[in-house]
Amino acid sequence: MTGADLLGSLGQLLGGKIQDRTEFRGETTFRLLPADLREVALFCRDELSFDYLIDISSVDNFGDEPRFEIVYELYSMKLSVHLRLKLRVSEDEGEVPTVSDIWPTADWHEREIYDMMGLRFAGHPDLRRILMWEGYPFFPLRKEFPLEGLPSDMPDVAFTSAAPLEGGPFVTAPSTATTKDREPRARRPTDAL
Amino acid sequence: MREVRPAAYDSKIEGNVIFTRLDAAMNWMRKNSLWPMPMGLACCAIELMATASARFDISRFGAEVMRFSPRQCDVMIVAGTVTYKMALAVKRIYEQMPEPKWVIAMGACASSGGMYRSYAVLQGIDQLLPVDVYISGCPPRPEALLEGLMKLQSKITGESSFREQKRELMQKLDGVMA
């Protein structure tokens, strides 16, 4: 069976579960409902040899409904095929089923998404923060969180304060110039681009 | 006629005796045996290791004895990005160092947060510790760290070491003199 056959048969087998199928430059993306995730994941692993979960990431489409998106990158070592699964999660719901028992590597990926984006994973064995400390009150990668941070204090653990975004040795200059010119670098704040 | 006899003169030690101020002697000993606490937190630590290695050879300045216990250190070299998660640990390690102690903020991140204007990075270790020498660079070259070390040495040369170390005795003496 080749990769194309595999993905074609997957589309047929899971026809009802797949909300949307996208092909872009040879990359296949399936959109699922969160409720179907575990069933599809188990099928992908056991029947279709997607034995490697490369990454899980989350996207904050602030202003859209549903607001969040979770992206699973799967890979089959046996057939050298990539597959991308996407879920949409509303802010009110904020929870999807875990896949950490299906691919153990998902444990820390899901913890990172919980830490940075505040989405919870039902059934996760150890859903703690992974980068920030327990008790940090914000989810820093959400769009409404300011770039400079917010002040917080956990006595004897850690504190944060807002970073100044103007002046200093590395200055960002917002404009429509190229990325190379916009990036933070050593320049006087008064220097125009 | 009274006989003039120099006290405790011994021709064998002639030339080995020098007269100096106590502060100058203490400072001379301190500045030439600075034992660093290598607080390596990011890429600056690589340059710190290069400085300690043969090509740049920090032992020419008596500072090659990197100690990984803060209780045996004189100077903390904060080499790298201090995140808020690490900040209080750095402070705690500094507090475990015995007096007299100094701090070198090595590189842009330790000095000011550097390019990390973000929620996660302390904007300069000087918000928590009294920094003696700031070294610019991202990361600084080993020569820059050696220059910073020499700046610290010249700073130590000017300190009133005895007065600072024996504060109570000096207060008592000042009282007697007054």
Image (spheres, grey):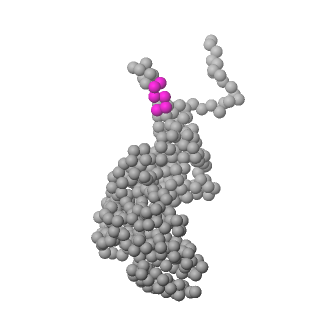
Q: Position of residue A187 (x, y in %)?
A: 36, 64
Q: Residue at x 46, y 84 (%)?
A: A11
Q: Which residues are magenta?
A: B164-169
Residue A115 in sight here: yes
Q: Residue at x 64, y 15 (%)?
A: B3
Q: Residue at x 48, y 53 (%)?
A: B106
* Horizontal side, residue B147 vs residue A136: left or right: right
Residue A71 sits above or below residue A1 on the image: above
Quadrant for the C terminus of chain A in the image: bottom left
Q: Position of residue A109 (x, y in %)?
A: 48, 65
Q: Number of callouts in the render?
A: 0
Q: Position of residue A184 (x, y in %)?
A: 38, 66
Q: Which quarter of the picture shows residue A137?
A: bottom left
* Residue A106 counted in the magenta span: no
Quadrant for the N terminus of chain A in the image: bottom right
Residue A188 in sight here: no
Q: Which quarter of the picture shows residue A171?
A: bottom left
Residue lying furthest right = B12
Residue A27 sits above or below residue B175 on the image: below
**For the stretch drawn in magenta, what is the main secondary structure?**
helix
Q: Position of residue A45 (x, y in %)?
A: 54, 74
* Horizontal side, residue B164 vs residue B8: left or right: left
Q: Residue at x 44, y 83 (%)?
A: A15
